[in-house]
Image (tube, rainbow, N blue to C red):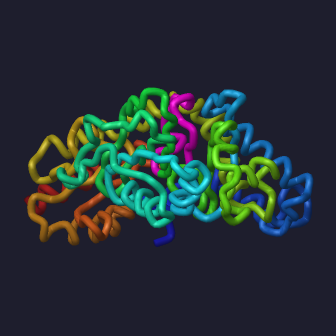
Amino acid sequence: MTERIHNFNPGPAALPLSVLEKVQAEMLNFRDSGMSILEISHRSDLFGEVLASARNRARRLFNLPDNYRVLFIQGGASLQFAMAPMNFLGTGDRADYINTGTWATKAFEQATLLGKNVRYAASSEDQSFSCIPTKADIDTGARYVHITSNNTIRGTQWRTYPDTGGIPLVCDMCSDMLSRPVPVEKFGLIYAGAQKNLGPAGLTLVIIREDMLLWNPDAVMPTLMRYKTYSDHYSMYNTPPCFGIYVAEKVMAWLEEDIGGLEAMASLNAAKAERLYGALDATDFYQGTAAEADRSLMNVTFRLRHRDLEAIFIKEALAAGLGGLKGHKSVGGCRASLYNATGMDAVESLVAFMKNFEKRMG
């Protein structure tokens, strides 16, 4: 196949074509330096400009108050499952977690592995994680409440964030980062691996409330596990993920300058999801798996009425230029990820394929 396909992969996922073209154009000679972005020093003025621009664009897109810091960290979001409790929970401190599926469960497991005092304030496990819990028993003495804002595997999403009575939210926002405006003041920590909506795997964007950098100052932990290390050293205590930051800066420029910001992006994402869910709901040949009220705008999960047709559907879709539609191995079925860079043209092509497949196989 010589042409690009419509990319519905759950991550690493689609990047804006215009960003990829700019990266391609600069790959051998970045800003007339005679070197690739992959070769320049992270201590150079050239990279310093990239880093500053990426930080400033994140601040503008999120409309961050002055008391929030933007950090760029290696290791992926899974590392944050351990970093958050290590940084925020000292002796006698406790935290609440809300369990909405695989990644929320993994975050909880890492906290317990570290011996931290955590508990589930709510869980939708008894409903196979097909929905977001409607109520949570929040401990008024909890240091923070951890949530996963969007659940890639089960296809659910927090449409509105839980009321925690002023306790800061710590949020794994991997799969809907920069897809919509966020009421930042509710959050003490937001973290996201870049590979869904921001850039290549290997970079994690972290937004942290300034006072939380000092919540557990006497804790014994590796230097690179402490958020304050990254804050104090401008995310450059060690060599940062330079290429990931470079691509992320270009993606955020695309969001700012081409799309028009997060409100505009949210409208586009809602329209894409509405179109695809409408096609699912128009027939019983396809069956959505998430509760309607909690359906994700990023990951549309569904099954076929005849399960034996799912592998054929996925294979034929790929042959038709529609990639990444296989559901997660833990649940099976199908999944279309509608991240920012996956456009309405891709959704329309998928809907047309679905109708044709049903006509032939139904």
Total numbered labels placed on residues in the image:
0
| Residue 88 falls left or right of residue 72 | left
Q: Residue at x 68, y 41 (%)?
A: 253
| Residue 177 falls left or right of residue 351 | right
Q: Is residue 120 something one can see in this rendering?
A: yes
Residue 348 within the magenta-colored segment of the rendering? no
21 and 143: which is toward the camera: 143
Residue 178 within the magenta-colored segment of the rendering? yes
236 and 244: which is toward the camera: 236
Residue 334, above or below 188:
below
| Residue 198 falls left or right of residue 319 | right
Q: Quadrant of residue 135?
A: top left
Residue 122: x and y, percent?
30, 44
Residue 11: x and y, percent?
47, 60
* Placement of the C terminus among the 4 image quadrants: bottom left
187 and 312: which is toward the camera: 187
Q: Quadrant of residue 311?
A: bottom left
Q: Residue at x 64, y 51 (%)?
A: 19
Residue 34: x and y, percent?
91, 65
Q: Residue at x 15, y 59 (%)?
A: 304
Q: Is residue 4 something one can see in this rendering?
A: no
| Residue 340 falls left or right of residue 288 | right
14 and 85: which is toward the camera: 85
Residue 145: x and y, percent?
45, 42
Chain part drawn in magenta: 175-193
Residue extending farthest front: 92
Q: Residue at x 84, y 47 (%)?
A: 49
Q: Quadrant of residue 309?
A: bottom left
